[in-house]
Image: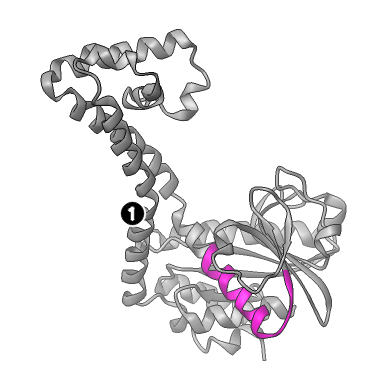
């Protein structure tokens, strides 16, 4: 029996049901609200501090709100890198003259609205890949649970510090800041890394499983693995697409399929053929048929719909057993 047959009997089982799509949109809304909370608190503090000003020009006398004024003026944190002190003062003066003074007694409300407008843009930017973030967290939790249930100890890599941390009794929410997982199985050392640049493929790959412990997996700060280690020690490479919107399903699959084809071509050129797999949240009927066909003819090694717990559990067991 092939690995995918443990959880799939037909292409129809890959299709995302309406209930899962609805639940996915709700999850995105909840995550957006969670991420918006710091911006709302910032706006409240900004308003309270700025309220010391009697007239708009008094705002210039409150040093604690300089960053808030720049934000209200429409300047992002990234743009401030390129601006001089004079540029910043000019932007704030423009805000006061063109928008706050015409607002009269409501200038505090006006400046808070403009602050939130700019921060909202930042939130929108962070939300563009939130589907992928949530997908990574869900798959990570499934893999961690699979290892725990099997009695296998693991180490995990922190996404910011890049340090590897030993498993503890309390691993709640580590998926929020996890970049990699390492464990031992009957076949030896295994290390799974997310979003790693594979030189042979010349691009980032969503999920990379290697037959090496973390100490031997040489990856730089730029998320690029040493070419010497890539090909012979690569077990499986996969694409993870967490977008839930059915309208974007085909586009996600086209992108993933192109990436998987590049992987197979690149590794084949040097005599290797790692397993390739696909995990997605939004899978439409035609897309499911194409995935099923590739599973049947051996092009794809495995696939799963991330919204279906049974499929997620099965592909997690498969990854942990390779």
Q: Is residue 176 left or right of residue 98?
A: right
Q: Is residue 197 left or right of residue 178?
A: right
Q: Secondary structure at mark 1?
A: helix
- In the picture as drawn, the residue positioned furthest to the front comes out as 52
Residue 167, image x and y in percent? Answer: 70, 69
Main SS, magenta region, reads: helix
Give the image quarter of residue 23. bottom left
Q: What's the residue at 36%, 53% (across, down)?
A: 32
Residue 307, image x and y in percent? Answer: 44, 74
Q: What's the residue at 29%, 34% (across, down)?
A: 117
Tell me the quadrant of the picture where the N terminus can be found. Answer: bottom right
Q: What's the residue at 12%, 18% (across, down)?
A: 104
Q: What's the residue at 66%, 80% (across, down)?
A: 148
Identify the residue under disc 1: 33
Give the color scheme: rainbow, by chain, secondary structure or one colour.
Answer: one colour
Q: Nearer the viewer, residue 82 or 265?
A: 82
């Amino acid at each position: 029996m092939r690995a995918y047959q443990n959880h799939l009997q037909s292409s129809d089982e890959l299709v995302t049901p309406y209930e899962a799509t609805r639940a996915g949109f709700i999850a995105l809304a909840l995550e957006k609200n969670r991420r918006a909370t710091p911006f709302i608190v910032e706006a409240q503090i900004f308003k309270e501090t700025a309220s010391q000003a009697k007239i708009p020009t008094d705002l210039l006398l409150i040093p604690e709100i300089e960053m808030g004024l720049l934000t209200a003026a429409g300047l992002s944190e990234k743009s401030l890198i390129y601006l001089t002190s004079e540029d910043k003062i000019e932007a704030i003066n423009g805000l006061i003259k063109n928008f706050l003074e015409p607002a009269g007694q409501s200038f505090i409300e006006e400046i808070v609205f403009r602050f939130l407008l700019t921060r909202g843009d930042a939130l929108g930017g962070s939300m563009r890949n939130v589907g992928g973030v949530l997908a990574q967290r869900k798959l990570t939790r499934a893999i961690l649970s699979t290892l725990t249930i099997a009695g296998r100890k693991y180490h995990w890599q922190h996404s910011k510090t890049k340090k590897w941390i030993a498993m503890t009794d309390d691993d709640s929410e580590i998926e929020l800041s996890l970049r990699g997982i390492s464990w031992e199985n009957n076949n030896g050392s295994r290390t799974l890394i997310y979003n790693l640049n594979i030189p042979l493929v010349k691009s980032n790959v969503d999920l990379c499983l290697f037959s090496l412990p973390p100490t031997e997996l040489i990856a730089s700060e730029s998320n690029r693995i040493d070419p010497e280690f890539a090909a012979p020690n690569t077990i499986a490479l996969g694409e993870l697409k967490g977008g839930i919107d059915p309208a974007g399903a085909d586009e996600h699959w086209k992108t993933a399929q192109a990436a998987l084809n590049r992987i197979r071509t690149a590794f084949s050129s040097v005599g290797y053929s790692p397993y390739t797999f696909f995990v997605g949240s939004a899978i439409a009927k035609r897309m499911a048929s194409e995935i099923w066909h590739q599973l049947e003819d051996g092009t794809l090694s495995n696939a799963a719909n991330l919204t279906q717990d049974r499929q997620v559990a099965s592909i997690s067991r498969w990854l942990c057993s390779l």
